[in-house]
Amino acid sequence: MAFCTPFRLCLSRHCPWCNYLRRVVPVEYEFGGLFEKAAQKGFNLVGLVPSFTAFSQNAGLHFVLKKLPDGKPKEKRHYRPFLALPDLELVRADNCGSGKAERMLKLLKLYPRLLFDEGLINGAFFQPELHIGFYPCQPSDDRLKVAEALLPHLNMLVTTTRRPDWHWARKCWEIWRIACQEYGIMRNGIGYPDLFVDRRMDQPHEPSGWLSYCLKAK
């Protein structure tokens, strides 16, 4: 839906056109030519997505080894250290008053600073996001068979002078795992840490595409 007229912006947070003009265009202007500037200074550009999952078999590190021509992942390498542990309950929207989602978002926003302090990145653009998914469940008192689950995560575009290989990704993962452990994310049954690390961006169009994804420009 678009609520704007040709001569007036509605300024609604639900309006795609206002989102594009007020958030996407300024970011694209600010980061215009990012790929070339990063190459000149010897920086590598990498996309990261720290998040959580209730499913132990999915949790861990996911590193992109190969990409398709459009930049999407083709082949990944996984590290799944929680396979022997049981699945956790989903963080449900009807139970968000417990503060779980807010706690997860607070930790996500802290993660770029932790990577910077460890010297793993030189800078980062990041955008928190709250995904809402629907999952089958046992009927509750209101006889609903579908649960509305919340999944906070962080879309990041980072610069680093390090070589962004598997060993670098493992170090980023360890920082994320330790942070989740210290915040009691697993101990309190909130979720397992999960980290997606993209392959280094080699094409000029990739940073723009990643930023558009972060800001939901499309």
Image (cartoon, rainbow, N blue to C red):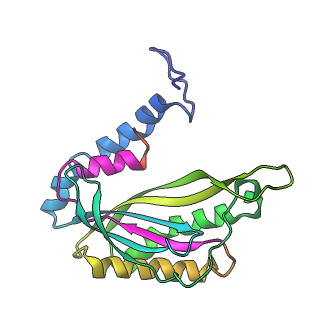
- Considering only vertical position in the picture, is 102 above or below 16? below
What residue is shown at x 76% (from left), y 64% (from top)? 98
Looking at the rendered image, the quarter that the C terminus falls into is: top left
x, y percentage for residue 152? 56, 59
- Give residue 113's position: percent from left, percent from top: 44, 71
Quadrant of the image occupied by residue 38: bottom left
Residue in the image at 52% along x and 81% along y: 83
Q: Is residue 213 left or right of residue 84?
A: left
Specify the segment rendered in magenta. 190-213
Residue 72 vertical placement versus 5 (above, below) = below
Say whether residue 196 is left or right of residue 9: left
Q: Residue 44: which quarter of the image? A: bottom left
The residue located at (51%, 20%) in the rendering is 4
In the image, residue 211 sits, relative to residue 121, either above or below, namely above
Q: Is residue 44 left or right of residue 131?
A: left
| Number of callouts | 0
Q: Position of residue 67 (x, y in %)?
A: 23, 59
Residues 82 and 151: in front is 82
Left or right: 135 with respect to 24?
right
